[in-house]
Amino acid sequence: MKIKFNWGTGVVLGFIAFIAFILYFVLQLYTDSSMEFEMSTPDYYKEELVYQSKMERMERAEQLQEKIQLASLDNELLIEFPSNMDYKNISGQLVFYRPSDQSLDFNINIQLDSSRVSIPKRLFKHGLWELTINWSYNSIAYTNIYKLDL
């Protein structure tokens, strides 16, 4: 029995080859131990539950007459809180998130001696960062989020 090779047979064989090619790469991706699949944050699902609260804090921060100011100087990142607020009543945390490498993430508690916080740039690996400032003033919570290229 001889199989006649025509254009229809070629299309079917090409389709089968294409499916085999895609399946090969999908299997390679899932069996390769050097590939890591990590969530952007370890407690991703727990964080989703408090999303509405975070949005309210961000909205409150946006409604302030005087906003937090950031300045990237030669050797430091300068964060200035609103001058119309007494810095002694400001508390919170600075959360630095590196999207490309979770091991570089770090937090700094806000302890103010003035309305400014200075962070040395030597703490940062060059590249993109996300800064989340979770802070409160007189028991009112605020959140500011900034994208930084340091």
Image (cartoon, rainbow, N blue to C red):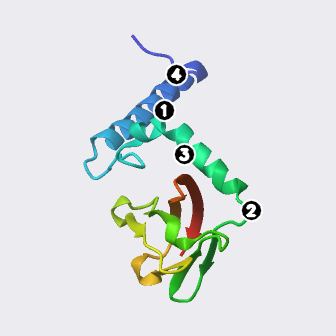
Residue at 45% from the left image edge and 31% from the top image edge: 17
Measure how far apart labels 3 and 4 are at the Cα level: 54 Å
Residue at 46% from the left image edge and 58% from the top image edge: 99
Residue 20, located in which quarter of the rendered image? top left
**Of residues 105 and 144, which is closer to you in this image?**
144
Q: Residues within 10 Å of mark 2 (few under 14, many from 20)?
A: few
Give above or below for 18 relative to 147.
above
Circle 3 sits on which residue?
54
Measure how far apart labels 2 and 4 are at the Cα level: 67 Å
Answer left or right for 122 relative to 87: left
Give above or below for 34 relative to 113.
above
Check if mark 2's residue and mark 4's residue have beta carbons within 8 Å. no
Label 2 or label 1, whichever lies nearer to me, is: 2
Give the secondary structure at mark 1. helix
Label 3 or label 4, whichever lies nearer to me, is: 3
Measure how far apart labels 1 and 3 are at the Cα level: 46 Å
Give the secondary structure at mark 3. helix
